[in-house]
C-alpha cells in the first residue's frame, strides 16, 4: 500500500507498473462522488404532536358517538316511541355527518402539519445545499492539496483541484485507490512502505501526523518536495470514519531557499576571503556578523565582536569618539565614516578607515574597515611631532620660549609664565617680553636676540637680570639654538633659561653659613676653653670627668640642634637626655606641655641642666638609690614666661652651700645675665628646688609632643663585662681611635686594631673574628655598613659611634644596633659594650660567611 503525496490513500495489493493517468485539473469535477444525502428527518416534537392529535380526535369521537347512541336510543324510546324507525334513520345520518366533520378536522390538521414539515425540510435542504456548495468551492479552490479518505482502507473519497494538480492523480484513475505505484520517498531518499504513509498511520494510530517532509516523483517526471499533515476524523461515538490529509508543494520555496543559501554561502565565502574587515550590524547598530579577516586581524571571535564587542578592538583613546559617531549615524540613518585605531592580534594598533551604509530593505548596516595606517601614520607623525614640541615647550620644568624672526612668540612654557607672573597674552611678541622684563635695558637685549636668528649653532647668552610681574628681580642664564623654519618659512629659535636666583642666594647663604660655622666652631672652642679654665679642682681625675661631662653636654645640645636643623630643641628631649646620662633606673620624671627652646638658648640652657644633674648626682637626690628628680614646666601666658621647676626628693639632707661653686655661678650668669630670666634656688632639707623663668624670646610653644626614641639601656658596671673579650675598633680619626683604645684597654678588653678603612676592617674581621665591634659610620667618605653586615652575619654584636644623629641605611637589622653620638663618655661606652656582651642572643662563631 502506498501514499499519495496529497495524502489520499487507496487499497490495492497488486503492484502497478503503469504510471497513474494524468488529467488536467480543469476537467476534474470540483468534488467527485460525494456521499449520498438522505432528506432530513422530521423533528421529533413535530412527530409527537402529529400523533397526539389524531388519537385525541379518535377518542373524542368514540366517547361522543357512544353517548349519542345511548342518549338517542333512550330519547326515542321515551318520546318517539311511535315513530322509531324514522328516528333511527335520522340518527344514522346524524352519526354519519358527525363522523364526516370529525374526519375533516383530522385530515385538515394532518395536512397542515405535513405542509409545515415539508416547508421546513425544503428550507433546511436549501441551507444544506448552499453550505455544501460553499464547502465544495472552498475545498476545490484551496491553495493547498486536500484529500479525504475513508476508513479503514484509506481509499480516497474527495480530492480537491490542488491535490489533483500536485499529484496528477484523480478519483477516476485506477491508481488513485492504490499506494504501491506512488513514487514517494522520505527526506533521506528511502522509499515509503504502505504502513509509513501519513494517511495510513493517522487511520491506524488515531493521531495527527504534522508536516512530514516527502519527496514525490510525479508521472510527468518532475520531482516535488511536499510537506504532509494527516489527521483522523471521528463520528459521534468516537470511531474513526475518515482522515483528512493536507499537503503543500514547497518545491519552489525550498529551491528558492537553497538558492538563497547558496548565494549567501557564496557571499559569505567572498566576504571571508576579503583581505579587509567587513561587518554587518542590525538596524539598532549592534554587530551581528564579522568576517574572518576581521576576526583574524583582531584576534577576537565572532561572539566577542558581536553587539558592542567590536569596541574592544578600538584604541582606548579613539573609543569614545568612534562610539559617539556610530550611535549618531545609526540614530539618523546616515552614512558613517570614521578613522580610528584597531588593535591587531599582536597587540599593536593600526589606523583604519571605517565606512558603513544602511541597507534600505532590511535596515541593516554593511561596513568595511580599510587599513590606512601608512597614510595616517605620516599625518599622525607630523601632528605628534608638532604636539610633542608644543608639550615639550609648554610642560618643560624650566623656562623655554620658541620665537620667530618676525618677533612672534610661537610657544612659551608654563614654567616661564609661572616664574615671571606674566600671561601668555602679555608675552605674545619679543617686544612685549623686552618691555616688561628689561624696561630701559631692552634696546641692548633686542640686538642680541635678533642676532640669534642668524646663528647655525647653540650659544650661551650669559646671565641677565629680569623683572617679574610683581616687581621681583630674578637672575636668568639664557641658552639659545636655531631649530629650523616653520610652515610659513620663518626661522625659529628656541631660548631656554635657567633660574640662577636661588643658586645665587644659596651661594650667598653658603658663604654666610661658612662664616657662621666658623663663628660657632670658634665660639664652641671658646666655651670649651672657658670650661677648662673654670673647672678647678685638685684631683686630675675629677677635673677630667668634669670637663668631659660639660663638653658632652655641649655635644648633646649640638646633636639636638642638628637634628632639628638648628631651629631649636625640644625641652622634654633636652631634659631627658641630660638626666639619662647620669641615671639608668628611670628615677626622674619630665612633665610639661610641648615647648621648643630657641636655637640661641639651647646650648646655654643645656649647660644649666647639666650642672643641676651633676650636682644631684654628686650631692643630691641622684647620689642615692632612692632619690628622684622631677622636672616640670608650664607656659605663663599672662607674663609671657616659660616657668621651669627642678625638684629633688629622696636624697640626703640638704644644707645651704657656704660658697658659690662653678655650677651656681653658671646658673646665675646664664639665666639672669644671658637670658634675662628669673632664677630661684631653694636649698630645702628634703632636696634642692630650682625655679627658672625664661622670657618669650627663649622658647616657642611647639604644639606637638615629640616621640622619644627608646634609649638603649646600658649596664651599670663600668668594668669589663667579659674580661679579655676581643673588641674591634673601626675609626678613621687617629686621636679618637687612640682614646677609644685606651678606654677599652683600661677596662680590661683586648682591642683589635684600630683600623680606618672598610676593606681593612673586613679583612681583620674575617682573619680574627672579634667578640664585639665599635664602628664609626663614615670612614674616609665610605660608610661602614658592609663591615656591620659582615659582623651581623657572623653573629658578632656591634655598636655605632658617630657624629651623625641617625643611620641612613635601609637595613633594618643595622638600625637596631646601638648608636652613641660623639663625643661619647667613657662610662657610657663601657656600659653599652657590657650590655651588648651580656645580652647578645648568640655568641661569635668565628665562621666567616662566604
Image (tube, helix red, strand yellow):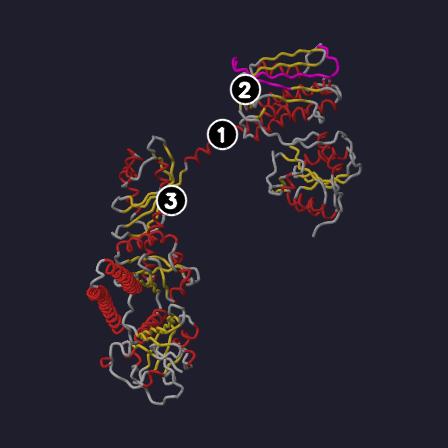
Region of the chain picked out in magenta, as a range: 631-657
Q: Earlier in the sequence, mark 1 or mark 2?
A: 1
Which marked residue is nearer to the observer: mark 1 or mark 2? 2
Real-space Cα separation, disc 2 to disc 3, in angstroms: 47 Å
Real-space Cα separation, disc 3 to disc 1, in angstroms: 35 Å
Read off the residue under disc 1: 512
Q: Nearer the viewer, residue 240 or 613?
A: 240
At 22% across and 80% down in the image, what residue appears?
A: 26
Read off the residue under disc 3: 395
Residue 318 vertical position relative to residue 135 in the rendered view, above or below: above
- Measured as percent of width and height from the top left, residue 788 is found at 67, 43
**Quadrant location of residue 69?**
bottom left
- Measured as percent of width and height from the top left, residue 244 is found at 35, 73
Real-space Cα separation, disc 1 to disc 2, in angstroms: 23 Å
Q: Nearer the viewer, residue 409 or 592?
A: 592
Which marked residue is nearer to the observer: mark 3 or mark 1? 3
Q: Earlier in the sequence, mark 2 or mark 3?
A: 3
- Residue 744 in the figure: left or right of residue 598: right
**Quadrant location of residue 149?**
bottom left
Residue that protrudes farthest toward the right in the picture: 723
The image quadrant where one finds the N terminus is bottom left
- Residue 582 in the figure: left or right of residue 121: right
Residue that protrudes farthest toward the front in the picture: 82
Q: Nearer the viewer, residue 688 or 627?
A: 627
- Measured as percent of width and height from the top left, residue 124 is found at 24, 67
Q: Nearer the viewer, residue 58 or 797?
A: 58
- Measured as percent of width and height from the top left, residue 297 is found at 40, 64
Residue 634 vertical position relative to residue 518 in the rendered view, above or below: above
Dot 3: few (<14), some (14–19), or many (≥20) neighbours within 10 Å?
Answer: some
In the image, residue 658 lies in the stretch drawn in magenta: no
Secondary structure category for the residue under label 2: helix
Mark identifier at residue 698: 2
Amino acid at each position: 500500500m502506498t501514499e499519495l503525496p496529497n495524502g489520499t490513500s487507496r487499497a490495492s495489493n497488486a503492484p502497478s507498473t503503469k504510471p497513474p493517468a494524468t488529467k488536467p485539473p480543469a476537467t476534474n469535477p470540483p468534488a467527485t462522488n460525494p456521499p449520498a444525502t438522505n432528506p432530513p428527518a422530521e423533528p421529533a416534537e413535530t412527530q409527537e404532536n402529529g400523533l397526539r392529535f389524531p388519537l385525541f380526535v379518535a377518542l373524542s369521537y368514540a366517547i361522543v358517538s357512544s353517548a349519542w347512541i345511548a342518549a338517542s336510543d333512550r330519547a326515542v324510546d321515551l318520546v318517539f316511541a311511535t315513530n322509531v324507525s324514522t328516528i333511527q334513520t335520522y340518527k344514522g345520518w346524524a352519526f354519519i355527518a358527525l363522523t364526516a366533520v370529525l374526519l375533516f378536522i383530522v385530515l385538515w390538521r394532518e395536512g397542515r402539519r405535513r405542509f409545515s414539515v415539508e416547508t421546513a425540510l425544503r428550507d433546511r435542504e436549501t441551507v444544506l445545499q448552499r453550505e455544501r456548495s460553499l464547502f465544495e468551492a472552498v475545498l476545490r479552490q484551496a491553495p493547498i492539496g486536500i484529500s479525504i479518505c475513508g476508513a479503514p482502507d484509506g481509499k480516497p473519497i474527495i480530492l480537491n483541484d490542488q491535490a489533483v494538480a500536485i499529484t496528477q492523480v484523480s478519483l477516476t484513475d485506477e491508481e488513485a485507490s492504490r499506494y504501491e505505484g506512488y513514487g514517494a520517498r522520505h527526506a533521506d531518499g528511502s522509499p515509503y512502505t504502505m504502513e509509513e504513509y501519513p494517511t495510513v498511520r493517522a487511520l491506524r494510530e488515531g493521531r495527527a501526523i504534522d508536516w512530514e517532509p516527502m519527496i514525490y516523483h510525479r508521472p510527468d517526471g518532475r520531482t516535488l518536495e511536499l510537506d504532509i499533515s494527516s489527521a483522523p476524523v471521528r463520528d459521534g461515538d468516537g470511531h474513526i470514519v475518515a482522515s483528512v490529509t493536507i499537503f503543500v508543494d514547497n518545491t519552489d520555496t525550498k529551491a528558492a531557499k537553497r538558492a538563497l543559501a547558496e548565494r549567501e554561502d557564496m557571499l559569505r565565502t567572498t566576504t571571508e576571503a576579503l583581505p579587509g574587515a567587513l561587518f554587518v550590524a542590525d538596524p539598532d547598530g549592534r554587530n551581528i556578523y564579522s568576517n574572518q579577516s576581521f576576526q583574524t586581524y583582531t584576534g577576537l571571535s565572532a561572539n566577542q565582536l558581536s553587539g558592542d564587542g567590536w569596541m574592544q578592538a578600538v584604541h582606548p583613546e579613539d573609543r569614545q569618539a568612534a562610539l559617539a559617531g556610530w550611535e549618531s549615524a545609526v540614530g539618523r540613518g546616515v552614512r558613517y565614516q570614521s578613522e580610528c585605531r584597531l588593535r591587531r592580534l599582536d597587540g599593536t594598533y593600526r589606523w583604519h578607515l571605517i565606512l558603513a551604509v544602511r541597507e534600505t530593505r532590511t535596515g541593516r548596516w554593511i561596513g568595511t574597515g580599510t587599513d590606512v595606517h601608512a597614510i595616517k601614520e605620516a599625518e599622525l607623525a607630523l601632528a605628534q611631532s608638532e604636539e610633542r614640541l608644543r608639550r615639550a615647550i609648554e610642560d618643560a620644568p624650566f623656562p623655554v620660549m620658541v620665537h620667530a624672526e618676525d618677533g612672534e612668540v610661537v610657544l612659551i612654557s608654563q614654567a616661564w609664565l609661572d616664574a615671571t607672573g606674566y600671561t601668555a597674552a602679555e608675552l605674545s611678541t619679543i617686544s612685549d617680553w623686552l618691555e616688561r622684563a628689561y624696561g630701559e635695558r631692552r634696546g641692548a637685549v633686542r640686538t642680541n636676540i635678533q642676532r640669534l636668528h642668524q646663528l647655525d649653532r647653540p650659544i650661551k647668552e650669559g646671565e641677565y637680570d629680569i623683572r617679574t610681574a610683581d616687581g621681583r628681580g630674578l637672575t636668568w642664564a639664557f641658552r639659545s639654538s636655531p631649530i629650523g623654519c616653520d610652515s610659513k618659512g620663518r626661522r625659529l629659535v628656541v631660548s631656554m633659561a635657567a633660574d640662577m636666583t636661588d643658586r645665587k642666594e644659596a651661594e650667598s647663604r653658603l658663604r654666610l653659613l661658612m662664616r657662621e660655622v666658623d663663628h660657632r666652631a670658634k665660639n664652641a672652642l671658646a666655651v670649651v676653653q672657658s670650661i677648662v679654665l673654670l673647672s678647678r679642682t685638685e684631683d686630675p681625675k675629677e677635673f677630667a670627668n668634669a670637663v668631659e661631662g660639660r663638653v658632652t653636654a655641649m655635644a648633646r645640645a649640638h646633636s639636638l640642634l642638628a637634628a632639628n636643623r638648628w631651629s631649636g630643641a625640644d625641652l622634654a628631649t633636652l631634659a631627658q637626655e641630660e638626666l639619662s646620662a647620669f641615671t639608668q633606673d628611670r628615677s626622674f620624671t619630665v612633665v610639661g606641655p610641648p615647648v621648643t627652646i630657641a636655637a640661641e638658648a639651647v646650648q646655654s640652657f643645656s649647660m644649666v641642666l647639666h650642672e643641676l644633674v651633676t650636682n644631684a648626682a654628686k650631692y643630691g637626690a641622684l647620689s642615692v638609690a632612692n632619690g628622684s628628680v622631677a622636672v616640670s614646666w608650664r607656659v605663663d601666658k599672662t607674663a609671657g614666661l616659660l616657668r621651669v621647676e627642678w625638684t629633688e626628693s629622696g636624697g640626703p639632707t640638704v644644707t645651704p652651700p657656704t660658697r658659690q661653686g662653678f655650677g651656681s655661678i653658671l646658673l646665675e650668669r646664664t639665666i639672669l645675665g644671658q637670658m634675662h630670666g628669673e632664677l630661684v634656688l631653694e636649698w630645702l632639707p628634703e632636696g634642692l628646688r630650682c625655679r627658672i623663668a625664661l622670657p618669650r624670646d627663649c622658647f616657642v610653644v611647639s604644639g606637638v609632643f615629640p616621640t622619644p626614641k627608646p634609649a638603649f639601656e646600658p649596664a651599670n658596671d663600668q668594668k669589663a663585662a667579659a674580661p679579655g673579650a676581643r673588641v674591634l675598633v673601626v675609626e678613621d680619626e687617629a686621636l679618637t681611635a687612640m682614646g677609644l683604645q685606651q678606654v677599652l684597654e683600661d677596662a680590661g678588653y683586648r682591642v683589635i686594631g684600630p683600623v680606618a678603612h672598610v676593606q681593612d676592617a673586613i679583612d681583620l674581621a674575617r682573619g680574627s673574628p672579634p667578640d664585639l665591634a665599635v664602628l664609626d659610620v663614615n670612614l674616609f667618605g665610605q660608610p661602614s655598613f658592609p663591615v656591620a653586615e659582615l659582623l651581623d652575619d657572623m653573629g658578632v654584636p656591634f655598636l655605632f659611634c658617630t657624629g651623625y644623629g641617625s643611620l641612613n641605611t635601609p637595613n633594618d637589622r643595622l638600625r637596631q644596633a646601638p648608636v652613641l653620638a660623639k663625643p661619647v663618655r667613657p662610662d657610657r661606652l663601657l656600659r653599652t659594650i657590657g650590655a651588648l656582651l651580656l645580652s647578645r642572643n648568640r655568641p661569635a662563631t668565628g665562621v666567616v660567611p662566604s
